[in-house]
């Protein structure tokens, strides 16, 4: 993998080249950074791709700079790990397949496809992530569940069952790790005491800043 910054008109674009990628795609994150990920391609290909997506890029940058709540265009875009992508990225294969099977093309059915995708992707991404931190923290949970929740990012029960919000797939990976470590720490301290926060901080030294950032996250409605 290689990374470099390229200039397109007045835009600075972070170009990440991953030879194993099948497709190329562009995203814009909360820091107003334009990110282009491609396999090994020519400068001519990159220039044409940026030209094709220029209007979409500028639209996203404007919304973010004005602090307009992010709202994706269903059937066309996907919010994943805090960045908005077009729906043709490799990670959205499951979603595209679900949408293709929709018989009645209503907004309710489309939104259900998105919810199913986020739950499916939660299993794929969060399961190995929580196992990684559980091993690192030398902790064991009895069960792991995923579901869409409106008021909390995760929970830990007295039976040592951890439930993670499938909406976590929409926020930055650093914030996801914070939620995972937070819930694992509840296996030791079923409260938010000083000892609890100290345990979290051992494994995530930036936990205070991440906690503040997570409090300010309001998930966009699709």
Image (spheres, rainbow, N blue to C red):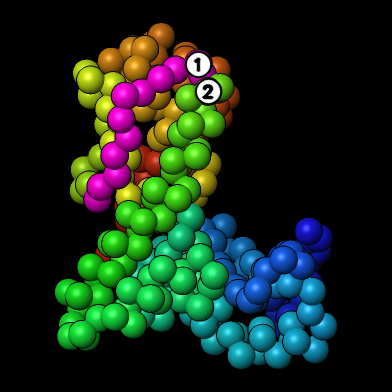
Can you tell which mark lies on residue 135? 2
Q: Is residue 68 visible?
A: no
Q: Is residue 48 visible?
A: yes
Q: Element under label 1? A: loop
Q: Nearer the viewer, residue 16 or 11?
A: 16
Residue 32 screen position, x and y as percent: 57, 63
Can you tell which mark lies on residue 138? 1
Find residue 58 and report its image quarter. Answer: bottom right
Classify 10 Å Cα crowding around label 1: few (below 14), some (14-19), many (20 and above). Answer: few
Q: Is residue 52 above or below residue 210?
A: below
Proximity of marks 2 and 1: CB atoms separated by less than 8 Å: yes
Which range of residues does the magenta coloring cover? 137-148
Find residue 41 and report its image quarter. Answer: bottom right
Residue 13 screen position, x and y as percent: 70, 70
Residue drawn at (50%, 71%) of the image: 85
Point out the image quarter for the C terminus: bottom left
**Marks 2/1: CA distance?**
5 Å
Q: Nearer the viewer, residue 6 or 22?
A: 22
Residue 72 screen position, x and y as percent: 37, 73
Q: Element under label 2? A: helix
Find residue 23 and report its image quarter. Answer: bottom right
Q: Is residue 119 magenta?
A: no
Q: Is residue 44 above or below residue 130?
A: below
């Amino acid at each position: 993998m290689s990374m470099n910054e390229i200039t397109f008109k007045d835009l600075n674009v972070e170009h990440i080249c991953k030879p194993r990628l099948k497709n190329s795609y562009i995203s814009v994150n909360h820091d107003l950074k334009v990110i282009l990920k491609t396999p090994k391609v020519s400068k001519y290909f990159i220039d044409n791709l940026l030209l094709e997506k220029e209007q979409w890029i500028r639209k996203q940058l404007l919304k973010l700079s004005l602090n307009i709540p992010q709202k994706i265009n269903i059937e066309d875009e996907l919010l994943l790990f805090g960045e908005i992508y077009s729906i043709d990225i490799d990670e959205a294969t499951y979603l595209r397949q679900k949408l293709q099977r929709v018989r009645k093309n209503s907004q309710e059915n489309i939104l259900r496809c998105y919810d199913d995708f986020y739950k499916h992707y939660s299993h794929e991404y969060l399961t190995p992530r929580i196992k990684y931190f559980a091993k690192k923290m030398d902790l064991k949970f009895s069960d792991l569940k995923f579901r869409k929740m409106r008021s909390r990012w995760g929970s830990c029960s007295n039976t040592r069952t951890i439930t993670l919000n499938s909406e976590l797939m929409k926020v930055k990976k650093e914030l996801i790790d914070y939620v995972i470590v937070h819930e694992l720490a509840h296996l030791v301290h079923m409260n938010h005491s000083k000892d609890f926060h100290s345990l979290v901080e051992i494994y995530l030294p930036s936990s205070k800043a991440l906690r503040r950032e997570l409090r300010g996250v309001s998930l966009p409605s699709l």
